[in-house]
Amino acid sequence: MFMPDNASAGLDGTTSDAINVAWSFSRAGVASLFVFNGPDEIFRKFEETGANVRRMEMPIPGLKQHLNPFYRRRFSRQLVEFIEREGIDVIHLGHGGLFVLNYLKSSAVLKVSVQQGATPEFKPIGMFDGGFTLHPKKLLKAWYRKYVRLNYKRSDLVICIGEAAREAALRSFHVAPEKAIVVRPGIEGREAKALQGEIRSELGIEPHEKVILSVGRITRAKGVEDLGNVARMLCERGRKYRFIFVGHERDHAYGKKIRAEFGRYVTFLGHRVDIANLYAGADLLAHLSHREGLGLVVIEALEFGVPCVAWDIPGVSEAVEDGVTGCTLRFGDLEGAADAIENLFENPATLEALKSGARKRFTRYSINDYAGRILAAYEARLRVIEN
């Protein structure tokens, strides 16, 4: 399995899933090799799984590299030699690794890709999604994005994290239906390692104070502005809830703007490695993301009995069952989100029922059979190919 570097020290959902795959393969005794060339902090998390993880020179994405015949020939030869030397049967490319398929044209291994993203409105990816242009360099980059970077045609199998992700694979990327298989994620439990009360002590949060947690990148698409506005509404109503946002920003100017606008209502903690402590200290998860393939943070929170308030959009609504593990609301209804949070805290019995439902639901995402489900997807696809 090759997991491309996400270009930051943050542990996003795609990398978290790759680490969970490593845990599951290691525990199941599946002969596997994981390649990750990212930050040491995340590399160590792969090592902690007990899987055979290494750093190895891999091709990098980019128009310049793709159009360089010497670069392509070198890595194509290098990957073929690696596959033969290691006795590889399956190349499993983590989310974002599609470009590697262009270096595996002559290899007969099973080529597996992963689709984790989805949008509320499924539409085919186009050349000019970023705006029409006649600039030659921009045209080439747009061509590369559509026909190389996001081209699933050379994949033998596309593992989709949920139904919304599969719908995106079919409708946005034109993956053949027989190639797209849903394999729900397996999550490595963290509750046993969490330090109860640690985050409340660190931030000076009183035992009676209610904590609403949100986890993601500081981007509009991840709902950070929605969270800030909901927090402001509740503050103006006189509710002294503590809103915490965990995650980094890639656009530092945007991050600075968001902290300036909402820092009075939301505590921004940046990237944290002790996310289990955050879940353990939270009463509620607010996941107001605008697009998700499933929402791994929602599933992670289930283990801790933390219900979720979220927008009712594809992907998220798969992870949040209204009235069972949380509540879903019409997209963009900020007033409704504020009301839902307030109502839950004003009705302890309802909140406790949701907490119980969350814990029960987490069992559906056991890591114990994750490797088996992935292998079953490999085998099912191989049977179709061989027949």
Image (tube, rainbow, N blue to C red):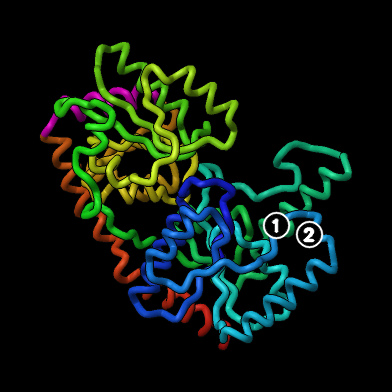
Determine whether the residue tagged by mark 2 lies in a helix, strand or loop: helix
**Residue at which label 2 appears:** 65
Image quadrant assignment for residue 79: bottom right
**In the rendered image, the vertical position of residue 366 relative to residue 329, given as above or below:** below
Residue at (12, 32) in percent of width and height? 348
Q: What's drawn in magenta, residue-wise? A: 333-348
User: Which of 295/248 is in front?
Assistant: 248
For label 2, the crowd category at 10 Å Cα-Cα, with few meaning under 14, some 14 to 19 and many 20 or more, is few
Please indicate whether residue 143 sits to the left or right of residue 45 in the image. Answer: right
For label 1, the crowd category at 10 Å Cα-Cα, with few meaning under 14, some 14 to 19 and many 20 or more, is some
User: What percent of the width, then of the height, locates residue 162?
Assistant: 43, 57
Q: Is residue 338 part of the magenta span, yes or no? A: yes
The residue type indicated by label 1 comes to Pro
Please indicate whether residue 366 sits to the left or right of residue 232 in the image. Answer: left
Residue at (72, 52) in percent of width and height? 145
Image quadrant assignment for residue 46: bottom left
Residue at (26, 23) in percent of width and height? 241
User: Which of 48/304 is in front?
Assistant: 48
The residue type indicated by label 2 comes to Gln
Marks 1 and 2 in Cβ contact (< 8 Å): yes
Q: Residue furthest left?
A: 349
User: Which of 233/272 is in front?
Assistant: 272
Using the rendered image of the protein, determine whether residue 157 is visible from the camera's viewpoint: no
Determine the main secondary structure of the stretch shown in magenta: helix
Determine whether the residue tagged by mark 1 lies in a helix, strand or loop: loop
User: What percent of the width, then of the height, locates residue 314?
Assistant: 44, 46
Image quadrant assignment for residue 253: top right
**Residue at which label 1 appears:** 61
